């Protein structure tokens, strides 16, 4: 669950969930876990998914290089952008 998440989206979600534009480590961790949980729920059982097929609302969470084309949820619950 070590996917790189866009910092600006983490801050946006911190305001949404906690009304906290400058989150402490606890709030930031909670926001990151929720975002990762949403990604995991979407990817579960789908195999390898083209990033272009993901909903924009989830794809915007990810801060991936331009060479990333697909994402997959590995059996151990980890995600793997390729």
Image (cartoon, rainbow, N blue to C red):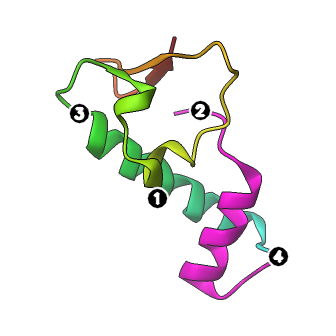
Across and down, in percent, residue 25 comes to 75, 63
Q: Which residues are magenta?
A: 1-22
Disc 3 marks which residue?
44
- Per the model, the C-alpha gap separating discs 4 and 1 is 17 Å
Residue drawn at 28 percent across, 45 percent down: 41
Which numbered disc flags the more N-terminal residue, 3 or 4?
A: 4
- Per the model, the C-alpha gap separating discs 2 and 3 is 15 Å
Disc 1 marks which residue?
34
Residue drawn at 49 percent across, 54 percent down: 35
Q: Relative to residue 68, is residue 13 depicted above or below?
A: below
- Per the model, the C-alpha gap separating discs 3 and 1 is 15 Å
Disc 2 marks which residue?
3
Q: Quadrant of residue 9?
A: bottom right
Which numbered disc flags the more N-terminal residue, 3 or 1?
A: 1
In this rendering, would 38 be left or right of 46? right
Q: Residues within 10 Å of mark 2 (few under 14, many from 20)?
A: some
Q: Residues within 10 Å of mark 4 (few under 14, many from 20)?
A: few
In this rendering, would 25 be left or right of 67? right
Tag 4 and tag 1, C-beta contact below 8 Å: no
Which numbered disc flags the more N-terminal residue, 1 or 2?
A: 2
């Amino acid at each position: 669950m070590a996917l790189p998440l866009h910092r600006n989206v983490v801050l946006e979600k911190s305001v949404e969930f906690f009304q906290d534009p400058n989150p402490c480590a606890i709030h930031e961790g909670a926001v990151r876990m929720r975002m990762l949980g949403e990604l995991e729920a979407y990817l579960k059982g789908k195999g390898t998914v083209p990033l272009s097929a993901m909903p924009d609302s989830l794809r915007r969470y990810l801060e991936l290089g331009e060479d990333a084309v697909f994402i997959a949820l590995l059996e151990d619950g980890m995600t793997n952008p390729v």
